[in-house]
């Protein structure tokens, strides 16, 4: 079975950002960012992903999302 995982923690660490800082930059609630960084959120709105990608200056979605085999 395949799973989709967000690499949000890794990307935030590379950019030296906290969840709170990313929340402020993106306009996404800190609680939502926390859930996404722990990969416990089951659904993510595409608009939310765009906000996060914009805040992190990501142009290639593979920097943020990976598909893994379980």
Image (cartoon, rainbow, N blue to C red):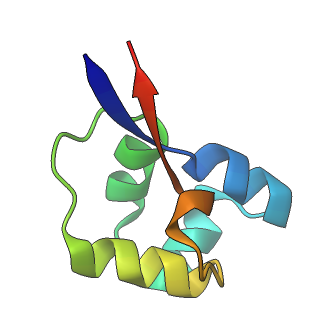
Q: Is residue 58 left or right of residue 70?
A: right
Q: Is residue 11 left or right of residue 69?
A: right
Residue nearer the viewer, 48 or 60? 60
Residue at coordinates 35% horizontally, 43% vertically from top-left? 35
Residue nearer the viewer, 24 or 38? 38
Residue nearer the viewer, 68 or 15? 68
Q: Quadrant of the N terminus?
A: top left
Residue at coordinates 38% horizontally, 81% vertically from top-left? 50
Residue at coordinates 34% horizontally, 68% vertically from top-left? 29
Residue at coordinates 32% horizontally, 29% vertically from top-left? 3
- Relative to 35, is 64 above or below? below
- Relative to 50, is 69 above or below? above
Q: Is residue 36 left or right of residue 45?
A: right
- Residue 24 place in picture, x, y as percent: 53, 81
- Residue 68 place in picture, x, y as percent: 44, 28
Q: Taking the image as drawn, is residue 16 in sight? A: no
Which image quadrant is residue 51 in?
bottom left
Q: Is residue 24 left or right of residue 42?
A: right
């Amino acid at each position: 079975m395949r799973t989709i995982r967000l690499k949000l923690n890794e990307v935030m660490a590379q950019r030296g950002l906290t969840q709170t800082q990313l929340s402020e930059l993106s306009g996404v609630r800190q609680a939502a960012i926390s859930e996404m960084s722990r990969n416990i959120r089951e659904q993510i709105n595409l608009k939310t992903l765009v906000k996060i990608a914009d805040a992190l200056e990501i142009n290639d979605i593979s920097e943020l999302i990976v598909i893994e085999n379980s």
